[in-house]
Amino acid sequence: MKMKMFLFFVVTCLLLVTTAFSETRYVTERMRITLRTGPDVSYKVVGLVNSGEPVEIIESLEEWTRVETSESKVGWVMTRFLSTDIPKKDLLERLEKEHEKLKEKSTSLASENENLIKENKDINRELSKKVLELKALKEKYDTLDKGCQKYTALKKTHDQISQQMDQRQAELVQLKEEKAILESNQLFWGFGLALGVLAVGFIIGKSSQRKRSGRLT
């Protein structure tokens, strides 16, 4: 008989006591409930849980539930104050906050869109300008190409417009060096020619002087 009573007591406890891991519930509408050290109002209060605050279910009894708060506090609260649904007012506040965030994001995106439209217009304007410049450059190239058909080297130079300035700069430096060498050579040969003329004049003068001396003797 005692064994039967004991089994009945155990089965009754198992039916009353249920354990739910990782289950989330919310404190019901607009209130603050006490978090106690045990499943009775006689136990010490260790904290308060606000409406809409999610709590993790650790152990459930008929009237009391052991929970863990978002601040990692563990204690007992009255089961009737817990709900599987978020309170409507808290849900509304969350939705309003999310709406404000989406509204701000929408405003930011609209501003970015306006900036992108403006940048796109600037790019199109610059592109049109570059197209006109390219067209003018092509016309100049065609004109120059028609006048320089006999000079394949010049045509290649025009085909490589991006390297034209560097090549011309190098050619200019080379021409300056050649000019300096030519002027130096001209000066040298002019000086040599002058010396030659003086030498010939000197020789002719000496020869004439000897002839005159011979006649006098």
Image (cartoon, helix red, strand yellow):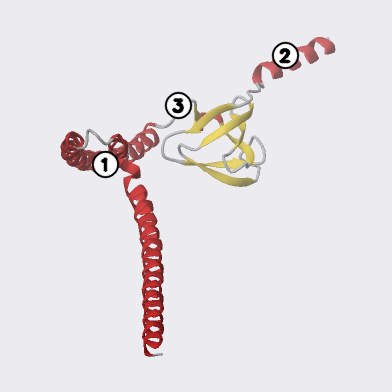
Upstream in the sequence, badge 2 or badge 3? Answer: 2
> The N terminus lies in which quarter of the figure?
top right
Residue at image mark 2: 11
Closer to the observer: label 2 or label 1? 1
User: Along the polypeptide, which appears first: circle 2 or circle 1?
Assistant: 2
Comparing 67 with 185, the one in front is 185
Give the quadrant of residue 61: top right
Would residue 173 appear left or right of 139 to someone viewing this image? right
Mark whose residue sits in front, 2 or 3: 3
Q: Which residue is mark 3?
A: 85
Instruction: Say what amino acid the circle numbered 1 marks.
Output: Thr
Label disc, if present, on residue 8 of the rendered structure: none
Task: Determine which quarter of the picture holds residue 181.
Answer: bottom left
Q: Residues within 10 Å of mark 2 (few under 14, many from 20)?
A: few
**18 relative position to 34: left or right:** right
- In this orientation, which residue lies closer to the viewer: 3 or 17? 17
Q: CA gap, disc 2 to disc 3?
A: 30 Å
Q: Are marks 2 and 1 in contact (CB under 8 Å)?
A: no
Q: Is residue 186 above or below residue 207?
A: above
Element class at badge 3? loop
* Residue in view at x 70 percent, y 17 percent: 14
- Picture coordinates of residue 2, whole percent (x, y): 84, 13
Mark 2 to mark 1 CA distance (whole Å): 61 Å
Kind of residue at disc 2: Val
What residue sits 59% from the left and 41% below the top? 35
- The span from disc 1 to disc 3 (Cα, nearest Å) is 32 Å
Mark 3 nearby-residue class (10 Å; few <14, some 14–19, many ≥20):
some
* Amino acid type shown at disc 3: Asp
The answer to whether residue 32 is left or right of residue 74 is left
Q: Secondary structure at mark 1?
A: helix
Mark 1, residue position: 107
Give percent across and percent down for residue 111: 25, 43
